[in-house]
Amino acid sequence: MLSDFEDFVNKENSREIATKAPEDYHEKQLAEWKDYLDQLYQKVESFLSQYTNSKKINIEYGSKEIFEEKLGTYEVPTITIIIGGKKISFDPIGTYLIGARGRVDMIGPRGSVRIVLVDADSSGPQITVTISNGLDKRKSSDSMKPEKINWAWKFITPPPYIKYIDIEKEVFLDILMDIAND
């Protein structure tokens, strides 16, 4: 009985070690998340450069603390667009999310819009279901293996008919006006 329990404990400990992600994996995820945020902000800055150069629009830079279970507490950059007396802020939500690699909320006086980091080729959420009875020992097909994903920031429409919309200059400016106008 004692040896059975010892075998059980050893097996569970080896399983725990095998499933734990190395510390540097999470550090890499965090660094990538911050890089993607910078890419989003650079895109926004490029869309508004004509107006920021002429001082018609200001962009303020800040930071925010986020807590995520796998990463702990960390700091990320934020931006706020100021047009006259109106402020539109970009509020990063996190990187460990279901269905997206990251999310930022764009918040204005009249509402908010979600921006998600998803597969560049995707036009909406994809759900894949795998059913296993636990007895089937066949290996999954090569088509089931995940391939390298090209991540892109996209606007996401509200439920129930969720779609992703590419962030292009005209679309961005239209959305910016929508959430900024009183």
Image (spheres, rainbow, N blue to C red):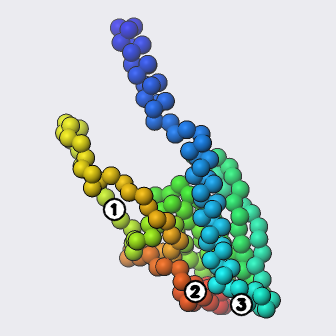
The amino acid beneath tag 3 is: Gln
Q: Tag 1: residue type?
A: Ile
Residue in front for this viewpoint, 25 or 110: 25
Residue depicted at 44% across the width and 61% down the height: 149
Q: Name the residue rendered at 38%, 57% in the picture.
A: 147
Cα distance in 3D space between marks 3 and 1: 40 Å
In the rendering, at what x and y percent does residue 168 appear? Answer: 54, 83
Quarter of the image for residue 181 reads bottom right
Seen at 70% across and 68% down, the residue is 78
Are there few (<14), some (14-19), or many (20+) residues within 10 Å of tag 3? few
Q: Image check: 100 left or right of 109?
A: left
Location of mark 2 (residue): 169
Picture quarter with the C terminus: bottom right
**Which mark is nearer the camera, 1 or 2?**
2
Q: Is residue 162 left or right of residue 78?
A: left
Quadrant location, the N terminus? top left
Q: What secondary structure is marked by label 3?
A: helix
Q: Is residue 113 above or below residue 150?
A: below
Return the x and y of residue 38 as percentages of the image width and height.
66, 67
Residue 46: image quadrant is: bottom right
Q: Is residue 32 above or below residue 158?
A: above
In the image, is residue 164 above or below residue 66?
below
The image quarter containing residue 176 is bottom right
Disc assigned to residue 127: 1
User: Which one is in front, 144 or 103?
Assistant: 144
Q: In this view, which residue lies farthest toward the top?
A: 2
- The amino acid beneath tag 2 is Lys
Q: Which residue is mark 3?
A: 50
Q: Is residue 44 visible?
A: yes
Which is more toward the observer, 156 or 36? 36
- Number of marks in the image? 3
